[in-house]
């Protein structure tokens, strides 16, 4: 792809990615649960927010750097975990990791990865990375996955807590789409009629046990309620990932960005906060930070970039978001991430 042909927005990658993948894969990546109202609302929720920019601030230079659990990051845009990157591109998660590293973005690897976590780490050895955990029922197997992640240099574990059962993903059922279980889960792991992996229902006791055996920061991923966020922090979680699983679980559940303010107010500085769901613009990142998030995660657009251009496509998608965030900061009168505060959002 020449520079003249390269998309100038993240959204322009989607039709190109659809042309590069088969229907089953496109629908698996794109689809949500039920009538997909939560999926649609994830985008609309960002657009409903209005900004109140500051004026007459010298914004000739902006500093987008931030930190996560002591690790310096070039900017607060991170890659959300998504399964089976090999369906988008032969380089799979290795390509995504390289592209994220080139853009200075933290990469979160899914348990349902088509490439072993060690190989993904080797693809971008110095880059920041987290491991997303679908916890196996067998606690020894679960602990072994965590220990492998630690040895491979993953800096936090984001345990998914919003999947007691797979959501009603009708696109996959219509397509008879069956997802491979990746390389980290046992091959005999049960699946539902749509081929979606079925995992044991986690309880608060399980989360407390996981905290006791996880020697690196632990993030509870998939939280939409302040009371649940507080309880997760009290159990010992170091981070709360606010989101509704990409609209793929309980349809009509609230968008992550709509749930964020209440959770941020309740948790305060006791945990790192991540928000995701429907991020398509750097302005979205600005809004997420203003409403209390420390990091803003992007999902499907990363896979679009991978499908279209491999690692370079991933890099470009993330750089578009970073550049738009930098411009949005300037126009809002913010010189640093710390200056992106709640008063910027009209309430």
Image (tube, rainbow, N blue to C red):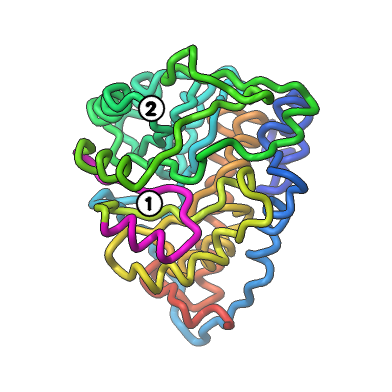
Where residue 51 appears, x then y in whole percent? 59, 78
How many labels sit on residues? Answer: 2
Where residue 214 appears, x then y in whole percent? 23, 38
Q: Is residue 313 above or below residue 48?
A: above
In terms of image quadrants, where is residue 272? bottom left
Looking at the image, the residue that sits furthest to the bottom is 56
x 66%, y 20%: residue: 178
- Say which residue label 1 marks: 74
- Callout 2: few (<14), some (14-19), or many (20+) C-alpha neighbours within 10 Å? some
Where residue 336 appears, x then y in whole percent? 39, 69
Mark number displayed over residue 137: 2
- Please provide the residue range marked out in magenta: 215-234
Q: Residue 185 vs residue 73: left or right?
A: right
Specify whether residue 222 is painted magenta: yes
Looking at the image, the residue that sits furthest to the top is 187
* Residue 152 can be seen, yes or no: no
Mark number displayed over residue 305: none
x 40%, y 19%: residue: 116
Mark 2 and mark 1 lie on one chain; the one further toward the N terminus is: 1
Specify whether residue 323 is painted magenta: no
């Amino acid at each position: 792809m020449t520079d003249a042909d390269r998309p100038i927005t993240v959204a322009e990658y989607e039709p190109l990615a659809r042309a590069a993948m088969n229907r089953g894969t496109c629908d698996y990546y794109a689809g949500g649960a039920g009538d997909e109202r939560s999926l649609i609302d994830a985008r609309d929720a960002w657009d409903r927010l209005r900004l109140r920019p500051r004026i007459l601030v010298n914004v000739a230079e902006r500093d987008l750097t931030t930190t996560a659990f002591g690790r310096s990051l070039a900017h607060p845009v991170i890659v959300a975990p998504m399964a089976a990157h090999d369906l988008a591109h032969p380089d799979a998660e290795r390509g995504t990791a390289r592209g994220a590293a080139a853009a200075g973005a933290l990469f979160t690897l899914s348990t349902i990865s088509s490439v072993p976590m060690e190989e993904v780490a080797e693809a971008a050895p110095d880059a920041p990375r987290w491991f997303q955990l679908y916890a196996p029922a067998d606690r020894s197997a679960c602990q072994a996955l965590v220990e492998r992640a630690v040895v491979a240099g993953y800096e936090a574990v984001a345990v998914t807590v919003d999947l007691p059962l797979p959501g009603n993903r009708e696109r996959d059922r219509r397509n008879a789409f069956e997802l491979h279980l990746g390389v980290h889960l046992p091959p005999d792991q049960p699946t539902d009629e749509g081929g979606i992996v079925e995992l044991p229902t986690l309880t608060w006791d399980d989360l407390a046990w996981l905290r006791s055996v996880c020697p690196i920061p632990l993030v509870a991923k998939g939280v939409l309620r302040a009371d649940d966020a507080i309880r997760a922090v009290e159990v010992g979680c170091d981070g709360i990932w606010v989101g509704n699983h990409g609209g793929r679980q309980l349809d009509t559940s609230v968008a992550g960005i709509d749930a964020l303010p209440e959770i941020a107010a309740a948790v305060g500085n006791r945990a790192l906060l991540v928000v995701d769901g429907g991020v398509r613009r750097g302005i979205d990142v600005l809004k997420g930070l203003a409403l209390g998030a420390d990091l803003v995660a992007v999902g499907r657009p990363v896979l679009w970039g991978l499908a279209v251009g491999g690692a370079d496509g991933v890099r470009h998608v993330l750089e578009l978001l970073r550049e738009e965030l930098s411009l949005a900061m300037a126009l809002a009168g913010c010189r640093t991430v710390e200056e992106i505060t709640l008063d910027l959002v009209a309430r």
